[in-house]
Image (tube, rainbow, N blue to C red):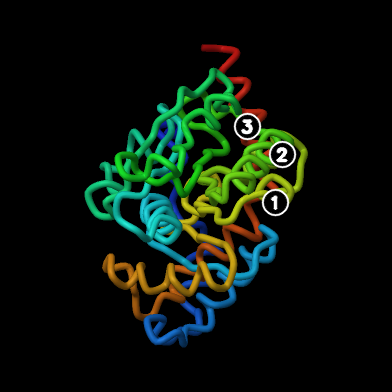
Amino acid sequence: MVTKTVDLRSDTVTKPTEAMRAAMATAEVDDDVLGADPTAARLESEVAKIMGKEAGLFVASGTMGNLISVLVHCDIRGSEVILGDNCHIHIYENGGISTIGGVHPRPVKNNDDGTMDIGLIEAAIRDPRGEIVYPTTRLICLENSHANTGGRCLSAEYTDKVGELAKKHGLKLHIDGARIFNASVALGVPVNRLVQAADSVSVCLSKGLGAPVGSVIVGSKSFISKARRLRKTLGGGMRQLGFICAAAFVALKENVAKLEGDHKKAKVLADIF
């Protein structure tokens, strides 16, 4: 009798498939700090296209992607970001936006479905007339799917409303889309529609999609240009990056289609336990 152990600690503990290993072995590479790695450029361009954004940038992790995104949008120290009190950026990212970027978090209560009440978000936006004593609000962050509320998915309509609110007050909107493909499959909504209102998105490829390493942040060309400089500042500029990106590209092309099956299996386990 053959016994097989299934590791359910996290969707981050998957191992590279044979196809990923083969892609890594044959990847065309160059120095990505010099902007010359063709495989990295191909992955970044593909993720940006899928998300409906102008450009992308590969980063080592979702935490790095969120940090860079917040710092690009909040490029003046003492800026403030509105985010959920139970979101990943606020709870699990080592306080990086504050310790590294000098950005002040303004938490708003997360509901059981991962949303924040639109009225509470608007009430948290600082009155510019009080800038002599208050931080300046510059950014709103959402998380989709929302990990700490059981992976709840934010609808496109809700995200649109937050985007409209951001525009009304001259703010930017960033989405921590670590598992945005899971949300897309679960809701039956194209992934680019879910992030249409966002100025930037962090997309993890090493969680639900099973790549060994990495995330891609997407946004405008101007946003990505600034993000690339910050990536280097944070020590995230890597040389022959294509080896890693080749495996991530396989994950992107082959594993999105498998998420529906993953969801069915997860539901079976949830019903049992």
Residue 266, compared with residue 221, is above or below; it is above
Q: Give the numbered dot on residue 153.
A: 3
Q: Amino acid at mark 3?
A: Cys
Q: Mark 2: which secondary structure?
A: helix
Q: Residue at x 51, y 12 (%)?
A: 273
Q: Which residue is mark 1?
A: 196
Contact flag, marks 1 and 2 (Cβ < 8 Å): yes
**Residue 259 place in picture, x, y as percent:** 65, 41
Q: Which residue is mark 2?
A: 156
Determine the residue positioned at 41% across, 53% down: 70
The disc labelled 1 sits on which kind of residue? Gln
**213 or 92, which lies in front?**
92
Between the C-alphas of marks 1 and 2, the distance is 8 Å
Give how far apart the Cα atoms at labels 3 and 2 are. 9 Å
Tag 1: Cα neighbours inside 10 Å, few (<14), some, or many (≥20)? some
Could you tell me residue 44's position as x and y percent?
56, 70
Q: Residues within 10 Å of mark 3 (few under 14, many from 20)?
A: many
Q: Secondary structure at mark 3?
A: loop
Decide which of tag 1 and tag 2 comes sooner along the chain: 2
* Residue 254: mark in rendering: none
Q: Is residue 22 visible?
A: no
